[in-house]
Image (cartoon, helix red, strand yellow):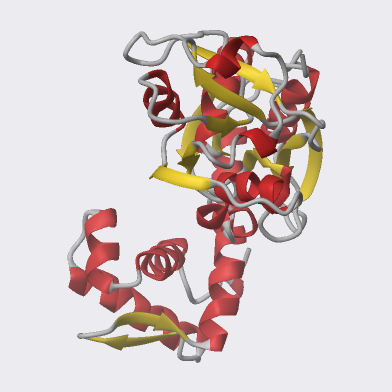
């Protein structure tokens, strides 16, 4: 290529812009990149001069924001940077070998079910693929697939962010969790009507909280929430101590809480609609060969089935 045909900007400048956009401040980008704030600021100014457009608005007290042109440039910069990384990765492996990073997003309560077989099996088959994990609720995944920050994610189908490509892995209905010495532990399926006067330990993380409350509202009921916690195991631990009941979707093989108290899972009657667990990926970016291989592998696994 003739030197005159080369772009006036550099990948380094683009990477600084993307980092600054993600962090929201020049100082934050500098800390993440391990460079000085002046180096980031100079790179942004040089990029703006090269493109002949203002990309950012930088205010000392308010941080950094993107102009409308800056938003478009950041989106294109992410794609260019991803392509450059892909070029580098493709040259590091033997023909047919998968090499390079995959960032996997996973809803926190799904992580104990999804990640162990996925990381062990796929990792053993493709040891030169770097699997990075981001545990995040649906709201935190918003925009990350389209931006390229996350390559693939495993989430509940009730609140999928944006309009990604998707495939269902399995589905499970919610169930009631009670302490082993609770009278409901031996009585078979439980009616929601029998729970409204009891204390609910609510898993208060979207979409789990919305889903649980919707089960009651669909029957004209309002549960009595005693505690709200954001951890799946915190629900099981409080239930194990007899502080209330829980409503959960995932079904661990271990019947004991962290503290060793036994808990019992009971079905809900009448039956409630199952919750789907999906694998999702960007609709606007073609997945890399290694990401596609991970999706195919995930779809081939023998996931849990309703009891």
Q: How many numbered marks appear?
A: 0
Q: In the figure, is residue 27 to the left or right of 92? A: left
Q: Is 269 situated above or below 8?
A: above
Q: Is 261 situated above or below 76?
A: above
For image coordinates 58% across by 33% down, the residue present is 247
Q: 25 or 86, which lies in front? A: 25
Q: In the figure, is residue 287 to the left or right of 14? A: right
Q: In x, y percent, where is residue 31?
A: 22, 58
For image coordinates 48% across by 34% down, the residue present is 133
Which quadrant of the rendered structure holds the N terminus? bottom right
Q: Is residue 234 visible?
A: yes
**Image quadrant where residue 256 sits:** top left
For image coordinates 77% across by 17% down, the residue present is 305
Q: Is 172 situated above or below 19?
A: above
Q: Can residue 100 be seen in this view?
A: no
Q: 75 or 156, which lies in front? A: 156
Q: In x, y percent, where is residue 238?
A: 37, 27
**Image quadrant where residue 162 sits:** bottom right
Q: In x, y percent, where is residue 43?
A: 33, 74
Which quadrant of the rendered structure holds the C terminus? top right
Q: In x, y percent, where is residue 41?
A: 27, 77
Q: 52 or 291, which lies in front? A: 291
For image coordinates 72% across by 28% down, the residue present is 268
């Amino acid at each position: 290529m003739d030197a005159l045909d080369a772009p006036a900007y550099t990948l380094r400048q683009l990477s600084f812009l993307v980092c600054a956009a993600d962090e929201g401040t020049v100082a934050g980008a500098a800390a993440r990149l391990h460079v000085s704030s002046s180096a980031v600021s100079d790179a942004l100014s040089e990029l703006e001069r090269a493109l002949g457009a203002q990309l950012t608005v930088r205010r000392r007290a308010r941080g950094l924001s993107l102009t409308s042109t800056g938003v478009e440039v950041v989106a294109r910069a992410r794609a260019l940077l991803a392509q450059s990384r892909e070029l580098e990765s493709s040259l590091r492996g033997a023909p047919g070998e998968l090499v390079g990073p995959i960032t996997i997003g996973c809803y926190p309560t799904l992580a104990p079910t999804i990640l162990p077989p996925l990381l062990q099996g796929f990792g053993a088959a493709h040891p030169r693929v770097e699997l990075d994990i981001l545990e995040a609720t649906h709201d935190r995944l918003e925009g990350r697939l389209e931006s390229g920050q996350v390559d693939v994610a495993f989430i509940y189908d009730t609140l999928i962010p944006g309009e990604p490509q998707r495939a269902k892995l399995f589905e499970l209905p919610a169930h009631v969790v009670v302490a082993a010495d609770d009278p409901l532990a031996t009585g078979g399926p439980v009616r929601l009507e029998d729970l409204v006067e009891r204390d609910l330990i609510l898993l208060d993380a979207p979409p789990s909280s919305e889903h649980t409350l919707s089960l009651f509202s669909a029957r004209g009921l309002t549960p009595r929430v005693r505690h709200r916690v954001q951890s799946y195991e915190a629900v099981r631990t409080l239930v194990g101590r007899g502080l209330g009941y829980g409503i959960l979707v995932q079904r661990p093989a271990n019947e004991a809480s962290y503290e060793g108290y036994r808990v019992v899972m009971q079905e809900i009657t009448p039956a409630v609609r199952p919750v789907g667990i999906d694998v999702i990926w960007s609709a606007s970016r073609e997945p890399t060969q290694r990401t596609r291989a991970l999706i195919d592998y995930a779809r081939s696994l023998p996931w849990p089935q309703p009891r």
